[in-house]
Amino acid sequence: MRYFMKLSLVLVCWGAIGSGESVAESRDVVVVANVENKDIRLDKREVRNLFMGNTIDVVLEPVSLPPETLTRAVFNTKIIGLTESRIQSYWSQMRFSGRSKPPKEMQDVENLLAYISTHKGTVAFFPADVPIPDHLTVVYQTRQ
């Protein structure tokens, strides 16, 4: 099953590249948080640190889409700067050493949006074209 999901991601990416569009250029992402302070903004480094288990000045719980989604591939390329396999290797080391654990994963955009909508202090990334409810705050976007 996992092999099939990886193969599907490869085929989706192949189709994007074959059409003259690279994976990183196929979409923009927004990083959205459920916070009291609507003025909060994060820079790329802070977003990367949050999703890689490092601390920043703001305490937020990152929540992610699963590895086989195009949005996650775009996020990994544009924000994290690592391939999914490198990220998985990193998290294996972090779990083994007991230092940190990866972000919780939701199966799709709808479930992810529902989760952060009902959990204060959470942060997640979405395709830029997803309507974001007013009670949530866009804290970073790749399209500037």
Image: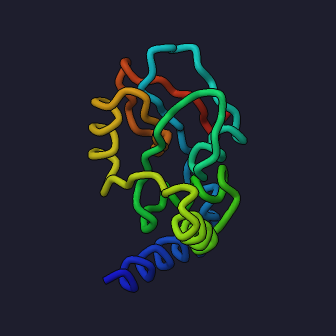
Along the line of sight, the residue nearer the viewer: 66 or 58: 58
Residue at horizontal 60 percent and vertical 58 percent from the top = 76
Percent across and percent down for residue 49 are 65, 45
**Residue 7 in the image: above or below residue 124:** below
Is residue 19 visible from the viewing direction of this image?
no
**Residue 133 in the image: above or below residue 82:** above
What colour scheme was applied to this rendering of the protein? rainbow
Query: Which quadrant, please, contains the C terminus?
Result: top right
**Residue 37 in the image: above or below residue 29:** above
Residue at horizontal 65 percent and vertical 30 percent from the top = 42
Along the line of sight, the residue nearer the viewer: 95 or 125: 95
Residue at horizontal 37 percent and vertical 27 percent from the top = 120
Q: Is residue 80 left or right of residue 61?
A: right
**Residue 35 in the image: above or below residue 81:** above
Percent across and percent down for residue 90 are 62, 67
Percent across and percent down for residue 23 are 60, 63
Return the residue found at the far front.
98
Percent across and percent down for residue 79 are 66, 49
Q: How many marks?
A: 0
Residue at horizontal 51 percent and vertical 74 percent from the top = 15
Query: Which quadrant, please, contains the N terminus?
Result: bottom left
Is residue 136 visible from the viewing direction of this image?
yes
